[in-house]
Amino acid sequence: DRKEGIVTGIEVYLNDVKVYPVNYVAQIGENKYETLADAVAAAQAGDTIEIIKAGTYKIPNLPKNVTIKGAVDEVVLDCTGSGSIASVPNGATFENVTMNFGTSNYHGFQHAGTINMKDCELNGLFFSYGDMNFTECTFNAPGSDYSMWAYAGNLNYTDCVFNGAGKFVNVYNEGNANTYTITATGCTFNSTKVNKAAFNVKETCNSTALKYKVVISDCTTNENFPAAKEDGALLVIDPLVQVDDRKEGIVTGIEVYLNDVK
């Protein structure tokens, strides 16, 4: 007497295993779960949570270091909103999922551990608040804004593709004295607008000199990126990297390496 559109209240267990209803969305090994939150609650550190049903999901807080993997196509993680996306104190890995971030400033994961993303599509703008690694990911920037603010942490981009209006990563924080390293290796940058460098590196915040090491290796661009130039506070070192907000008398903590050359 099942009717379409009515959520059943019937549960069936065979030898202590729940087998009905069968509207499972995630699994850990052979164990299946009706919600992503249920799977996260059951997971142990190091587990892989596979999302087995296409759809859009909210990311719950991730207290343990787990992997969330899209086991089917069209798995979307809704990361829109403002403030913290989710608490990830011990890091996490995301694989084969689409993440929609929206356009809010200061919007990102709350995390002390490293976040890894592999083979993901990242739409919109988000901020880093700790170490992050991206491998074979596609970034689609929102309009004429950046894909990311490298606001804190060491960031590694490997074999990634960036699509947008030429502004992809804003390397900047508001006076943090830590030195962060931003690395891009084997990445491709496609811009729809001319004369916008991919990495915009801020040298100062008010009167505070910032500290960054930017390392670019074996990356390619289309024809829309700027040639090297210097104009006031702006220095375009390479089509990929520009340093702006330079102030006379402030010794910079910025180091830029292009194919192993400082």
Image: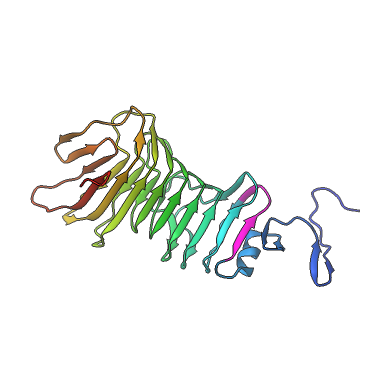
- Location of residue 55 in the rendering, given as x and y in whole percent from the top left corner: 65, 47
Q: Is residue 226 left or right of residue 81?
A: left
Who's the residue at 19% across and 39% down the image?
Answer: 234
Using the image as rendered, state which of residue 260 and residue 117 is in the foreground: 260
- Location of residue 203 in the rendering, given as x and y in whole percent from the top left corner: 20, 50
Magenta-colored stretch includes residue 40 = no
Q: Quadrant of residue 199?
A: top left
Vertical side of 189 occupied by 177: above or below: below
Who's the residue at 55% across and 50% down the image?
Answer: 78
Q: Which residue ends up furthest to the bottom in the rendered image?
A: 16
Q: Is residue 154 left or right of residue 261?
A: right
Q: What is the image's colouring?
A: rainbow
Evaluate whether residue 141 shows in this view.
no
Evaluate whether residue 99 shows in this view.
yes
- Location of residue 232 in the rendering, given as x and y in whole percent from the top left corner: 14, 38
Q: Is residue 220 left or right of residue 119?
A: left
Q: Is residue 67 left or right of residue 146?
A: right
- Number of labels in the image equals 0
Main SS of residues in magenta: strand
Who's the residue at 86% across and 50% down the image?
Answer: 3
Magenta segment boundaries in residue numbering: 47-56
- Location of residue 85 in the rendering, given as x and y in whole percent from the top left corner: 48, 57
